[in-house]
Amino acid sequence: MTTASPQRAALRAVRRPGDRIFSGTALGAGVVILLLLAAVAIFLITESLPAFTADPDEIGMLRGATFLEYVAPLVFGTLWAALLALIIAAPLAVGIALFISHFAPRRLAAVIGYVVDLLAALPSVVYGLWGATTFAPILQPFYVWLNENLGWIPLFEGPVSATGRTIATAALVLAVMILPIMTAICREVFLQAPRLHEEAALALGATRWEMIRMAVLPFARGGMVSAAMLALGRALGETMAVTMVLSASGVITFDLISSTNPTTIPANIALSFPEAYGEGVNVLIATGLILFIVTFAVNAIARYIVNRRAAFSGAN
Amino acid sequence: MNIKRVGTLAALGLTSTLLLASCAANETPDAGSGGDSSLSGTISATGASSQETAQAAWVAAFQTANTGVTVDYVSTGSGPGRENFLAGASDFIGSDRAFNDEEIAAGGFTSCASDEIVELPLYVSPIAIIFNLEGVDSINLDAATVANIFNGTITTWNDPAIADQNEGVELPDTAITPVHRSDDSGTTENFTEYLNAVAPEAWTAEADGVWPLEGGESAEGTSGLVGAVEAGQGTIGYADASRAGDLGTVAVKVGEEYVPYSTEAVAAFLDSAERVEGRGEGDLALELDRTTTAAGVYPIALVSYLIGCVDYEDANTAELVSSYFSYIASAEGQDEGNAEAGSAPISDDLRAEVEAAIALIG
């Protein structure tokens, strides 16, 4: 034992090939994601430049408007559709996640969790087809009812779309699409809530709802915000479903049920790119850059909220 | 343990190298299996997406008959197609419009050995005005009424402007929902050109691939538009006639008559068109007369051109392009287009002119 000890001290410094390979690949992966992001940013910026520097009158796609006038309704439409989808999906996702983690019998919970995950595996073009051909006509009579009974609210002012392919339908389809990711994250976070806190709450005579309100939700607040922001990111970038469902016009309106709807940046790129040429392509890429910045800003705000709230969460 | 691992890795590497090498060895060039024709080689083309379906059918039939030939048609849109032709990247192109006078005067077609080009109107896609109204299969409308429906002036189906032209047809008071394309499309461009030419007072916007009015119901692509028209009640839209299906169609007023869509009426429309003046012998660019009052002519159609050179640097390319064009212009090729893409076959008179133009390629 004693004779072996100096040798052992020398051995401590030896790094096995496995360690080296692991740390190397981990570092590589980290660098690759940064490089990718940088490459995307560089591509977007260099390809966008002609759109900003060229004379707007020369670019056929802008139709006499300046770039800002062109992109403003698109930014509005992107944020508006994503926000509506989030407002619809967030309570639903939290409810489903709570049901799975705290209310459902274990076997049922597993089945529901599986089914929700399955929703995430459907390609967005299928959602688009379903939304445009099946869901929109089903919703249309409901929009007529909304317009007749709540028409005094600007949101339901009309005139009502005859096909149901409105921003409300698009937002509902988006909500279904972002539901799985929100539910999955919320479920995991709720399951992480300290068991001791929960049992303590129950022991103090709290009902199950009170226990969830006092022990689970405060603990999960940061995670819920993160889930919402991830879902919002998906909603902001969704292309096919919106393209197929929405009757797009490129205007700014808060009306939810008319056939004149704002369109989103990704949907507009998908619609305009096939016939775009010359500087029109640069204009479209420039709108992509704006989307990049908007998504970045949304994520930054989310981080800020999560970090600020973390201090007040029940976790500590 | 470590040695074993390295060994496994090495073995893996060796196996994959061997596998890859054997793959490469398999790729023997498919040389000169010319079938029953002597043609061989590859020609590449880009251009109009409107021609995509028809081109796919033509390419398949042409390559079956000439197994040594490969024709690549990549649908890039007409604008990029014309740029490719100028830049010399495509042997021939499909374009929803012919080169205009300025472009012809400027010349500089890098694909060609000279500035002489052939422009052949070989893909003619009739545009039907389709509507979904229960119990009504066909209505008569003049251009001004169509324009007023699409610009939102006429809002119900029993409007006197519609009813006056359709005595005996029972029109409900359903609201009209006009549906337009949300993407940039040649169909929209031809439809708005028709409205602007025939009813300039009701339709003031100039012809444009992007729908010129703000707002209103819109849908992506032909399928999307037809789907939207089918989904609603009282909807009206415009689409390739082959896609009209069970929807009602509009007979448009030409002269004193109402002409329903038919392939013959569209072929007659092409025959009524004059050739653009001051062009080369092989340039069949047409001056489409939307305002024609000739009998039996249906004036709403997308006319898409095949554009190639009179002189190619490479004799083989010239031969391939000219035989491919000849096939498309033939009755067989035009019927194939009609069967697969719903295009209207050209008349025999126009075919004679086209064949004369193709004969120039060399």
Image: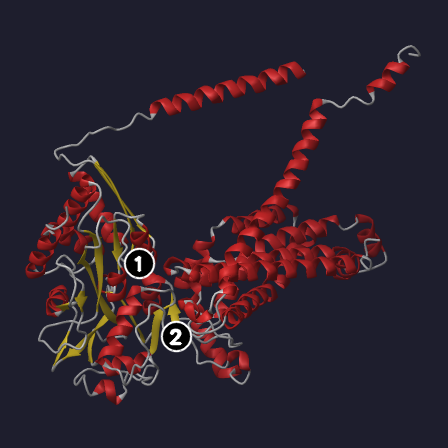
Quadrant in the picture for the N terminus of chain B: top right
Measuring from the top left, give residue B190's x and y in whole percent: 26, 69
Measuring from the top left, give residue B262's x and y in whole percent: 14, 66
Amino acid type shown at disc 2: Ala
Q: Is residue B274 above or below residue B291?
A: above
Which of B59 and B230 lies nearest the eye of the viewer?
Answer: B59
What is the tally of numbered marks visible in this picture? 2
Question: Residue under mark 2: which chain is it in?
Answer: A
Dot 1 alpha-carbon crowd within 10 angstroms: few under 14, some 14 to 19, many 20 or more: many
Q: Are marks 1 and 2 in contact (CB under 8 Å)?
A: no
Amino acid type shown at disc 1: Ser
Question: Residue under mark 1: which chain is it in?
Answer: B
Which of B159 and A11 lies nearest the eye of the viewer?
Answer: A11
Q: Is residue B45 above or below residue B10?
A: below
Residue A130 appears in the picture as rendered:
no
Q: Is residue B252 above or below residue B328?
A: below
Q: What separation in Å lies between label 1 and label 2 (alpha carbons)?
A: 33 Å
The residue positioned farthest toward the right in the image shown: A2
Secondary structure, mark 1, is: helix
Question: What residue did someone put label 2 on?
Answer: A162
Secondary structure, mark 2, is: loop
Q: In the figure, is residue B345 to the left or right of B87?
A: left
Q: In the figure, is residue B78 to the left or right of A87?
A: left
Measuring from the top left, give residue A85's x and y in whole percent: 56, 64
The residue positioned farthest toward the top in the image shown: A3
Question: What residue did someone put label 1 on?
Answer: B78
Which of B305 and A86 lies nearest the eye of the viewer?
Answer: B305
Residue A74 appears in the picture as rendered:
yes
Report which quarter residue A247 is drawn in: bottom left
Measuring from the top left, give residue B150's x and y in whole percent: 32, 78
Q: In the figure, is residue B89 to the left or right of A16?
A: left
